[in-house]
Amino acid sequence: GQQVMQIPQYQHVQEGEDFTTYCNSSTTLSNIQWYKQRPGGHPVFLIQLVKSGEVKKQKRLTFQFGEAKKNSSLHITATQTTDVGTYFCAGATSGTYKYIFGTGTRLKVLA
Amino acid sequence: DGGITQSPKYLFRKEGQNVTLSCEQNLNHDAMYWYRQDPGQGLRLIYYSQIVNDFQKGDIAEGYSVSREKKESFPLTVTSAQKNPTAFYLCASSIAHSNQPQHFGDGTRLSIL
């Protein structure tokens, strides 16, 4: 079945350093979504990518969707303590509402 | 104020007992979802529903049951057949189209007594 893997599983960075998490799907995706879950909280939608090679930015966050629509990345520039949490990607194949969530990357920012 | 309400926040289950987790939304969303999250892991889909009176199994449906009698409500029953029910359960909803974000409730944490 379809699988979505994320690396790394954990990442500790000093405040001000950059951070990147990578998402890889075993199948071609129609779109990919990114969510952030704060400790003790629930996932909150960040962004969605649909087009091959798409790049979107939200302030210090940059999201990319691969040309083959099987991988994606989230890059945070100059991390802040408010960036702490687990970042999940979630991919869907064409014609379905069913999203497969990645394993998540837990980010810890050291002040 | 629109949103998704899950209750209870914490739930304890005795061996051999069925328990039902509530999920209610007032976002007028057609699609609703149930996920299970184990410590340090991602979300795994249990069941999802695209429309009232219809639902599909997700990847880990065994030991769980759902109903969708009303658009606003999608309760999840954890049956005694689910041998390892201790987890964090998240309900979500979305507009019933592909490419739509999911809105999550605050979750229910289920533990075994």
Image (cartoon, coloured by chain):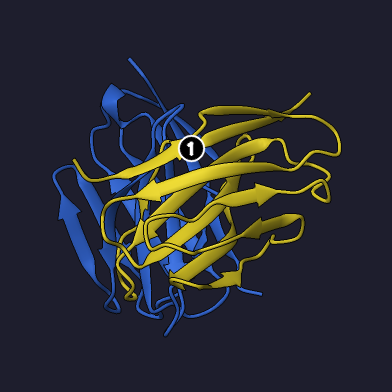
The quarter of the image holding the N terminus of chain A is bottom right
What residue occupies the far top of the structure in this picture?
A111
Q: Residue at x 48, y 37 (%)?
A: B107
Label 1: element kind: loop
Chain letter corresponding to the colour blue: A
Residue A61 can be seen in this image? yes
Q: Is residue B31 left or right of residue B111?
A: left
What amino acid type should be assigned to the residue bearing mark 1? Gly
In the rendered image, the vertical position of residue A102 relative to residue A18, given as above or below:
below
Chain letter corresponding to the colour yellow: B
Q: Is residue A59 left or right of residue A102?
A: left
Question: How many residues crowd mark 1 within 10 Å: few (<14), some (14–19), many (20+)?
Answer: many
- Name which quarter of the figure residue A38 lies in: top left
Residue A102 can be seen in this image? no
Q: Residue at x 43, y 61 (%)?
A: B32
Q: Nearer the viewer, residue A41 or A86?
A: A41
Where residue B66 sits: x, y (%)?
60, 59
Q: Report the number of discs.
A: 1
- Name which quarter of the figure residue B65 lies in: bottom right
The quarter of the image holding the C terminus of chain A is top left
- Name which quarter of the figure residue A51 lies in: bottom left
Where residue B57 sits: x, y (%)?
63, 69
Where residue A58 sits: x, y (%)?
16, 49
Q: Nearer the viewer, residue A90 or B57?
A: B57
Q: Nearer the viewer, residue B13 or A111?
A: B13
**Residue designated by label 1:** B107
Q: Is residue A62 left or right of residue B68?
A: left
